Amino acid sequence: MKNLFLLCIVLVSTSSFSQSFFDRLHFGLKAGGNYSDFYNADFDTEGLPGFHAGAIIAFDINKNWSVQEEFLYSTQGAKLKSEFSDDKDLKLSYISVPIVVKYKTDFGLYFEAGPQVGILASEDFKEITNDDFAEKIDAGMVGGIGYQFSNGLGIGARYYMGLTDVSKMKSTTVKTDFQNHMSQVSLFYIF
């Protein structure tokens, strides 16, 4: 009888834990536009428009705080403006995984910040060299602001600052230790 009572307590507590865990777990979709460029480069560049799209997984810590992880396909890069490139676009595509801590006010405004890692999916730039140009990993920090309606629909703006070098090429004439930076505007829906 004692064992049956303990089994009932364990089953009830496990059921309530899993229910509260899954009530706090949310999934969503996100898409929007990018505007990216390089910083810390000693050659002229202009920003390059692009896009991002992917999935969201969010976990509510409490009413105002949450942790959100995203899996995004993101196009980045820059337009090169120099004598050796003749206005060529350096297009880089990444599978980006930002993990942000998000603070949401009671009326829907939110602020977010955290790290982001990008894995190079493709590059479109073979004019200077036939070798691969970009490093396989791009890592940095993101920060953003936005608004989420009570139905889960939202809009956000985010800035990404890369902390790792984009180029794996080494040169004595051109500084190759430059980084990505990017602004994003997104629409999202969290279920």
Image (spheres, helix red, strand yellow):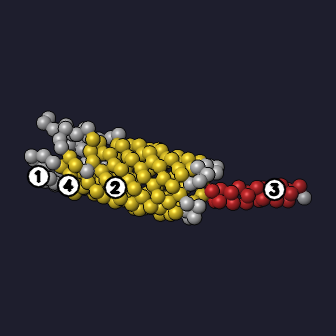
Rounded to the nearest angstrom, the CA distance separating label 1 from label 2 is 23 Å
Secondary structure of residue under mark 1:
loop
Nearer the N terminus, badge 4 or badge 3?
3
Q: Is residue 109 above or below residue 152?
A: above
Asked if marks 4 and 2 touch (Cβ < 8 Å), the reply is no
Q: Residue at x 34, y 49 (%)?
A: 182
Rounded to the nearest angstrom, the CA distance separating label 3 from label 2 is 52 Å
User: From where the camera sits, is residue 166 visible?
Assistant: no
Q: Which residue is drawn at 65% across and 56% down?
A: 21
Q: In this view, does 26 lie above or below 45?
A: below
Q: Which of the 4 image quarters holds residue 123?
A: bottom left
Callout 3 amino acid: Ile
> Could you tell whether 115 is left or right of 79 in the image?
right
Q: Which residue is drawn at 16% across and 54% down?
A: 88
The residue tagged 3 is: 9
Seen from the viewer's position, the closer of residues 104 and 117 is 104
Q: Which mark is residue 89?
A: 4
Callout 2 amino acid: Asn
Rounded to the nearest angstrom, the CA distance separating label 4 from label 2 is 15 Å
Q: How crowded is mark 4: few (under 14 residues within 10 Å), some or many (20 or more)?
A: some
Nearer the N terminus, badge 4 or badge 2?
2
Seen from the viewer's position, the closer of residues 69 and 157 is 157
Q: Residue 35 carries which label?
A: none
Rounded to the nearest angstrom, the CA distance separating label 1 from label 4 is 9 Å
The residue tagged 1 is: 86
Secondary structure of residue under mark 3:
helix
The residue tagged 2 is: 34
